[in-house]
Amino acid sequence: MSTGRAAEAVPHLRRAVGEVEGFPRDQVLYLTRLGTAHVDTGEIDQAVEHGHQAIACAAPLDSGTARANIQILCRHVQATGHRAAADLADHARSALVTAQA
């Protein structure tokens, strides 16, 4: 991702998500990075899907880093103007505010 070659990062990030199953903080990290890679490659539907998965992983956590990573992905999706951006942001707000309470 840092080299600007998002398409090449996708398979590595997908593999990383599978390798950290059972570790929700790590899953959030890799899912949000995978989502960002999909935004960069124009696959916004995939980015939104990974965003929802990351939110589900982060909901039971008390992790500012996980919330920040999700917010970053939400901003990237919103910047595309995609029709599902608002739903993703709403899901993040409701799930992660509940987790903080």
Image: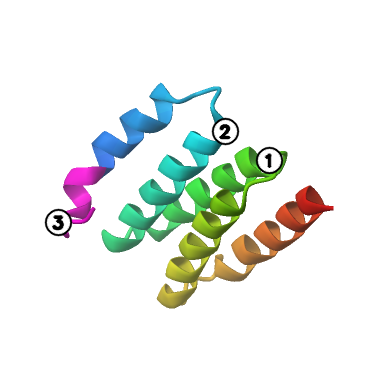
Q: Which residue is drawn at 49% across and 35% down?
A: 27
How dense is the environment of label 1, judged by Cα within 10 Å: few (below 14), some, or many (20 and up)?
some
16 shown above or below 59: above
14 shown above or below 78: above
For marks 1 and 2 on the same chain, the one whose residue lies earlier in the sequence: 2
Q: Residue at x 61, y 38 (%)?
A: 57
Along the horizontal axis of the image, is 93 left or right of 37? Answer: right
Q: Do the residues labelled 3 and 2 touch (CB within 8 Å)?
A: no
x, y (%) of residue 37?
Answer: 31, 54
Identified by mark 3, the residue type is Thr
Along the horizontal axis of the image, is 9 left or right of 73? Answer: left
For marks 3 and 2 on the same chain, the one whose residue lies earlier in the sequence: 3
Along the horizontal axis of the image, is 5 left or right of 69? Answer: left
Q: Are marks 1 and 2 in contact (CB under 8 Å)?
A: yes
62 shown above or below 96: above
Label 1 vs label 2: CA separation? 8 Å
Identified by mark 1, the residue type is Leu
Q: Give the range drawn in magenta.
A: 1-9
18 shown above or below 56: above
Identified by mark 2, the residue type is Pro
Image mark for residue 61: 1
Q: Is mark 1 on a helix, strand or loop?
A: loop
Q: Nearer the viewer, residue 61 or 76?
A: 61
Identify the residue under disc 2.
Answer: 24
How dense is the environment of label 3, judged by Cα within 10 Å: few (below 14), some, or many (20 and up)?
few
Label 3 vs label 2: CA separation? 26 Å
Image mark for residue 3: 3
Question: Is 56 a magenta residue?
Answer: no
Label 3 vs label 1: CA separation? 30 Å
